[in-house]
Amino acid sequence: QVQLVESGGGLAQAGGSLRISCVASGSIFSINNMGWYRQAPGKQRELVAAMTSGGTPTYVDSVKGRFTISRDNAKNTVYLQMNSLKPEDTAVYYCNARLTTRNLYRIDAWGQGTQVTVSA
């Protein structure tokens, strides 16, 4: 059993900042990529940012220069600092971890999602 628990998020004004966090726990042997996806109403889920275990980040073009992803591998935690927020950033943000369990299964684990709402 693997759990991803997100925290943070909420409501912000345009131009403001929010930080969301995600902790992975359970039967984990190792974690490769950790990252964040988002899904706005009526739209497909999209990758926002991800980071390898070695610390290499990837961002979708629309958030480059505004969002920063970071990881604490010792704590199995990933963060997303979101600055200069825009109304179009409004979505449910999902944490994702590509990991190997202690039984050596490779799985994609997901959090339950956290709402981020940006008002104009």
Image (cartoon, grey):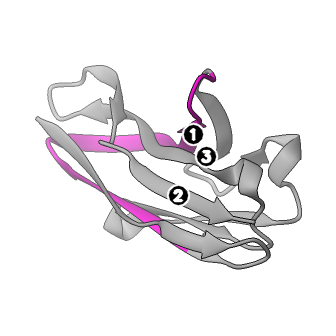
Answer left or right for 112 relative to 84. left
Q: Residue at x 63, y 23 (%)?
A: 43
Distance between mark 2 and mark 3 Cα atoms: 24 Å
Q: Is residue 24 magenta?
A: yes
Relative to 81, does residue 35 appear above or below in the rendering?
above
Quickly name the residue at label 3.
52
| Amino acid at dot 1 | Arg
Quadrant holding the N terminus: top left
Distance between mark 2 and mark 1 Cα atoms: 9 Å
- Mark toward the start of the polypeptide (2 vs 1): 1
- Label 2 environment density (alpha carbons within 10 Å; few <14, some 14–19, many ≥20): many
- Mark toward the start of the polypeptide (2 vs 3): 3
Q: Secondary structure at mark 3?
A: loop
Find residue 74 and report its image quarter. Answer: bottom left
Regarding residue 57, the answer to whether it shows in the image is no
| Amino acid at dot 2 | Val
Answer left or right for 106 relative to 93. left
Expressed as whole percent of the image width and height from the top left, the position of residue 64 reads: 86, 55
Residue lying at the far front of the rendered structure: 120
Between 5 and 108, which is closer to the camera in this rendering? 5
Quadrant holding the C terminus: bottom right
Task: Look at discs 3 and 1 and give the one toward the viewer.
Answer: 1
Answer left or right for 19 relative to 94. right
Expressed as whole percent of the image width and height from the top left, the position of residue 17 reads: 66, 78
Distance between mark 3 and mark 1 Cα atoms: 18 Å
Quickly name the residue at label 2.
116
Q: Are marks 2 and 3 in contact (CB under 8 Å)?
A: no
Find residue 68 and report its image quarter. Answer: bottom right
Quickly name the residue at label 1.
38
Q: Residue at x 61, y 46 (%)?
A: 52
Q: Are marks 2 and 1 in contact (CB under 8 Å)?
A: yes
Q: Secondary structure at mark 1?
A: strand
